[in-house]
Amino acid sequence: MSDSIAVPTHWYNIAGDLPVAPPPHLHPGTREPIAADDLAPLFASGLIEQELSTETDIEIPEPIREVYGTYRTTPLIRARSFEKALATPARIYVKYEGVSPVGSHKVNSAVAQAYYNSIDGVAKLTTETGAGQWGSALAFACAKFGIDLEVWQVRASYDSKPYRRFLIETYGGTVHPSPSELTEAGRKVLAELPDTPGSLGIAVSEAVEVAIGDAAARYTLGSVLNHVVLHQTVIGLEAVDQLRAAGETQADVVFGCAGGGSNLAGLAFPFIREVLRDRADTRIVAVEPAACPSITQGEYRYDHGDIVGLTPLLKMHTLGQDFIPDPIHAGGLRYHGMAPLLSHTVELGYVRGQAVEQTDAFAAAVTFARAEGIVPAPESSHAIAAAAEYARSLSEPEVIVIGLSGHGQLDLPAYHSYLSGELG
């Protein structure tokens, strides 16, 4: 279904299309709108330009498209067996990012971020990772562009998902459990909470602290920020075209999992573009874990992206920068905040949130795996669960698109916990 669809030549920036401009990021000290110079100690110049841009179409450099071309376009699969299992009249399509080299969508931004840092002459990158999809994706990308990488992985996932850590190391990255004794931020948390499972907010603080202290290093983030969301729009740009190629005029509903927001926004924003330009009336559902429900239970306000307060202030749905969620298996969704651009589209009414319990997510994932043969990542399973619930409720045909952001082949211990009844 994807063979006739070309790899996109441009990313799509929804900030230039929205009827109300997104709130600016603020400097953590002055609380004035952030400027490019304020971000220079952390990010590559090309990424800073993208972060602040309002251009709707931003060209993808050829070296990035070359790497994309090794695994894109990714398939849009008609999930007929899943439809049958659900006894639904819906036509369900799954946009499957698990075919990437690291098995998830994260590589779409990792390749871009490594490239822009390489042309700035950056020798080392630091980052955080939850379940390990982002860490392994960036390690792959850094190997491509000759950059060293140091990763702080949330302790809960560092312990429970060792294969992601092994993959990072295989690609050449160095991995530390977070919180660690290597940073002031980590030591402070450990002094107060020695048995903490960690959080992405803590890991972000550690990675940022090290980048700020090393003139040869820069920081990278796997979700939340505008430029990360931008890179992920290759997912939705392809999906819109693939759906038309399949004979569908539009998607009625798009479901995607939402932690920091990059996967859901990357899939959804090109569909929202069709709504903004009066070509569709697609509805978007951001599905989050009940253990970390930033959209459905958080506040929409300015907050830091990390626990210490080193990052810019972002206007987003947040549970608070010091929120540490339970150590659920969907480690990539354990973030206290939500991407500002995605949060803004929620406030404007283009996206609604839905929270799903972990056991419900795994139940739906097992049904999907037995029907379609693909084992979903625990994160993606939340979107599958919400979509399945909706599909079962239908009495008339609708077109449903699900973002399957990655495979769960390295998460099989989590499936074992569910199947054995150990998962509460």
Image: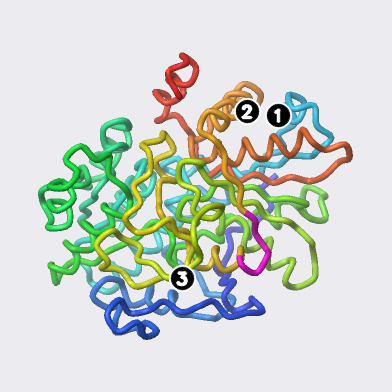
Q: Which mark is residue 315?
A: 3
**Residue 348 magenta:** yes
Magenta stretch: give its range.
347-352
Eyeballing the image, is 50 above or below 271?
below
Please rate how many residues cluster around mark 1, counting C-alpha atoms within 10 Å: few if below 14, some from 14 to 19, many from 20.
many
Which residue matches tag 1? 82
- Between discs 1 and 2, the one toward the N terminus: 1
In-image side of 341 versus 94 (left or right) = left
Which residue matches tag 2? 368
Q: Quadrant of the N terminus?
A: top right
Q: What is the spatial separation of the Cα atoms under label 1 and label 2, in whole angstroms?
A: 6 Å
Q: What is the spatial separation of the Cα atoms under label 2 and label 3, in whole angstroms?
A: 36 Å
Q: Are marks 2 and 3 in contact (CB under 8 Å)?
A: no
In-image side of 247 versus 286 (left or right) = right
Eyeballing the image, is 378 above or below 287?
above
Q: Residue placed at 28% from the left, 67% from the top?
A: 118
Q: Is residue 61 visible?
A: no
Q: Percent from the top left, x then y, of residue 359?
A: 53, 28
- Between discs 3 and 1, the one toward the N terminus: 1
Q: Amino acid at mark 2?
A: Phe
Q: Quadrant of the C terminus?
A: top left
Q: Amino acid at mark 1?
A: Phe
Q: Are marks 1 and 2 in contact (CB under 8 Å)?
A: yes
Q: Mark 2: which secondary structure?
A: helix
